[in-house]
Image (spheres, rainbow, N blue to C red):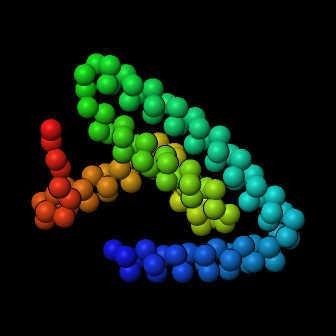
Amino acid sequence: MFRILALLMIVVPVMELWVLMTVGKWIGAWYTIGLVILTGVIGAWLAKREGLHTLQLIRLQLSQGQMPGSALIDGACILVGGATLLTPGFITDAVGFLLLVPYTRNIFKAWMRRLFERWIKNGTFIIIRR
């Protein structure tokens, strides 16, 4: 897992720089900078809106005595999506928007659910109940 993270920390910034330079040559530097700022502003607004909605859902489920499992995964996706939108670049912005839009976030949630189930079966991920 550490090797994958280390590889991502090297490959993603290089890819982002290449995409930013390519787009800058294509549409111009100022338009590229403006586009990066615009995606950041739109992403921050969307992250705030989706985050507040998810927080309300978690509070509602807790007040009804339910475990907010799906809503917590939503919150994790929104947190990661918001964090990737803070990183300047078009690739991370695309990933961030995919994690913030409810329809595409459901695809990631299904993938994460399967991953957690596999980890629990293999004993890699342990749940401690009190």
Residue 114 on image: x %, y %: 24, 56
Q: Is residue 58 above or below residue 95?
A: above
Name the quarter where the N terminus is drawn: bottom left
Q: Is residue 22 above or below residue 35?
A: below
* Res. 70 in view: yes
The residue lying at 52 percent from left, 52 percent from top is 81
Residue 15 on image: x %, y %: 61, 78
In the depicted structure, whether residue 101 falls above or below residue 8: above
Please tell me how many numbered marks the rendered image carries. Answer: 0
Residue at (13% x, 65% y) in the render: 122
Picture coordinates of residue 46 (x, y %)? 60, 41
**Whole-percent x, y for residue 53 in the image:** 49, 30
State which quarter of the image contains the C terminus: top left
* Residue 49: quadrant of the picture: top right
Q: Residue at x 41, y 43 (%)?
A: 74
Q: Is residue 108 left or right of residue 82?
A: left
* 35 lies left or right of 85: right
> Which is nearer the eye, 69 or 42?
69
Residue found at x 26% / y 32%: 67
